[in-house]
């Protein structure tokens, strides 16, 4: 019998039995940042939710996590309480994108009256076109976590919190405010706070505390495009609060992964054994017709009626050490009326001598107009029922196959069906996030925020990537979608 049956992907979903309070890990995947274990040993997550080395036999040797990049590596650099220093241009013109739409012709620094005047990746700010911010959670040499924002095209991150801990920056729908959690972000004493954007000096506005909101821990916080800020109360159950403050409101008694529809009122979420549920126009949530009960991590786009989600309708699993992991696939389904899910990215298996090389899907995200989806395919070797993630020394069948590959898939905006073949975009990368104009893709690679221009017609890369080095802050990935980069709306 396994210690825990995972119903999430990679390191994203919370187990219903996880405490979420002060945990270093909830499964061995979260221990990836510990590095390569000594021969004959592996990192596991013990009963106290701490990573520890254990001796294993070669037949069951497990990888220390699913993320190939060093997502939680601590940099030995400057004090986390300081900014990364004077802003330095990363060498890519913010106005350069994969083509300019009609009206989007004002370059960075040019005069504007609305963001639609500005080139891709820019918004109108104080009557000039300026680069969009991206929000991430990072760690530094002090060992704490820090909610951070950065102009996507300029090296240098700004910390949002005043205390030693902060996390989960989320922008408001008009792009002029950013919410985040500060204090002891793993405990019920944490605060949900707010700052203006661009960030100015002064104390943030505290909207509520974990104590006042009866929240053991703020998890899976979401805002834009919602009219309210939503979060998961620890491991299950969703609450909301108005960005102007007031009392927290209980939206659901169970469930996780809330996501707002483009009207700011509709929302979807997933609940264990129930699949995806949707609330439309303020009505009580109801199961999405046609979605399997294993469905999780729903995502709206801003234009089409298609909802994106992961699921495992065949109940296919793989064992990594002592943990059983769901082999998730990627689907789309109309949010109104439901129907038969369209498979956008299946699981794969490739027979090789001695076993097979298999894969599952994690961390999907829509382009805002629903024309593309980005996702991570996680590869592992399978011998019998035992899996070892590629990129680990024990995964001898994988050869040079990386553990993660980030793909883009074109999607028909009417039917939600895939079009053409997937575009292999970046190896050893995770947590993709499209800019609001779909001209850039942000992701985490090697603990660094990376932003790459893309051609919205072909999915091809445009120009050089902007890499925010981890000389002060290392961007975290170990909490899955909670650590996905968030873009400031235009």
Image (cartoon, grey):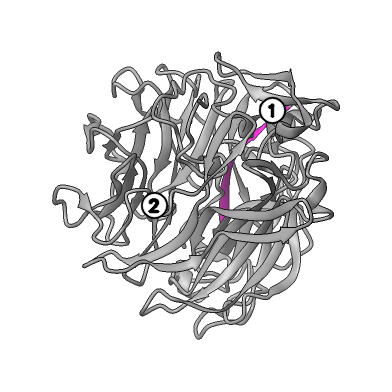
Which residue is under mark 1? 80
Query: 379 or 309: which is nearer to us?
Result: 379
Q: Quadrant of residue 240?
A: top left
Residue 95 quadrant = bottom right
Q: Is residue 135 magenta?
A: yes
Which of pointers 2 and 1 indicates the residue nearer the eye?
Answer: 2
Toward the viewer: 77 or 81? Answer: 77
Tell which residue pokes out farthest to the bottom in this image. Answer: 102
Which secondary structure lies at badge 2? loop
Residue under the point 63% across and 77% down: 455
Q: CA distance from mark 2 to mark 1?
A: 27 Å
Image quadrant where residue 291 sits: bottom left
Left or right of 207 on screen, residue 377: right
Q: In the rendered structure, which segment of residues is drawn in magenta?
A: 133-140
Task: Looking at the image, tell me whether mark 2 or mark 1 is earlier in sequence order.
Answer: 1
Give residue 247's position: percent from left, percent from top.
22, 29
SS category of the residue bearing label 1: loop
- Residue placed at 48% from the left, 60% from the top? 330
């Amino acid at each position: 019998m396994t210690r825990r049956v995972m119903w999430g992907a990679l390191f994203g979903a919370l187990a219903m039995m996880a405490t979420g309070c002060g945990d270093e890990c909830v499964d061995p995947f979260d221990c990836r940042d510990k590095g390569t274990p000594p021969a004959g040993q592996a990192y596991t997550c013990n009963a106290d939710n701490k990573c520890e080395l254990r001796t294993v036999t070669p037949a069951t040797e497990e990888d220390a996590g699913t993320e190939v990049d060093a997502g939680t590596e601590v940099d030995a650099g400057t004090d986390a309480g300081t900014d990364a220093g004077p802003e330095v241009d990363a060498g890519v013109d913010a106005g350069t994108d994969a083509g300019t739409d009609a009206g989007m012709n004002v370059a960075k620094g040019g005069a504007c009256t609305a963001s639609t005047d500005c080139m891709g990746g820019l918004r109108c700010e104080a009557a000039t076109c300026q680069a969009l911010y991206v929000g991430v959670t990072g760690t530094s040499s002090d060992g704490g976590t820090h909610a951070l924002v950065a102009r996507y095209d300029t090296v240098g991150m700004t910390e949002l919190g005043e205390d030693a801990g902060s996390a989960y920056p989320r922008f408001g729908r008009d792009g002029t405010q950013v919410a985040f959690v500060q204090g002891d972000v793993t405990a019920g004493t944490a605060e949900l706070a707010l700052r203006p954007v661009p960030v100015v000096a002064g104390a943030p506005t505290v909207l509520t505390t974990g104590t006042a909101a009866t929240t053991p821990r703020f998890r899976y916080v979401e805002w834009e495009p919602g009219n309210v800020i939503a979060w998961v109360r620890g491991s299950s159950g969703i609450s909301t609060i108005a960005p102007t403050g007031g009392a927290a409101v209980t939206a659901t008694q169970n469930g996780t992964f809330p996501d707002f529809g483009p009207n700011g009122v509709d929302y979807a979420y997933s609940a264990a054994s129930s699949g995806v549920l949707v609330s439309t126009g303020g009505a009580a949530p109801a199961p999405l017709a046609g979605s399997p009960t294993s469905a999780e991590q729903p995502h709206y786009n801003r234009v089409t009626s298609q909802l994106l989600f992961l699921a495992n309708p065949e109940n296919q699993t793989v064992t990594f050490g002592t943990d059983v992991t769901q082999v998730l696939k990627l689907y789309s389904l109309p949010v109104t009326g439901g129907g038969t899910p369209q498979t956008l990215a299946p699981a794969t298996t490739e027979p090789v001598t001695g076993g097979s090389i298999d894969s599952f899907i994690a961390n999907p995200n829509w382009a805002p107009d629903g024309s593309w989806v980005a996702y991570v395919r996680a590869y592992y070797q399978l011998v019998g029922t035992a899996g070892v993630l590629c990129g680990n020394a024990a995964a001898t069948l994988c050869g040079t196959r990386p553990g993660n590959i980030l793909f883009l898939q074109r999607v028909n905006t009417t039917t939600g069906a895939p079009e053409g073949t997937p575009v292999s975009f970046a190896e050893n990368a995770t947590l993709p996030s499209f800019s609001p104009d779909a001209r850039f893709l942000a992701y985490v690679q090697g603990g660094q925020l990376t932003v790459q221009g893309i051609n919205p017609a072909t999915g091809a890369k445009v120009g050089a990537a902007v890499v925010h080095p981890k000389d002060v802050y290392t961007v975290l990935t170990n909490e899955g979608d909670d650590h996905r980069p968030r873009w400031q709306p235009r």
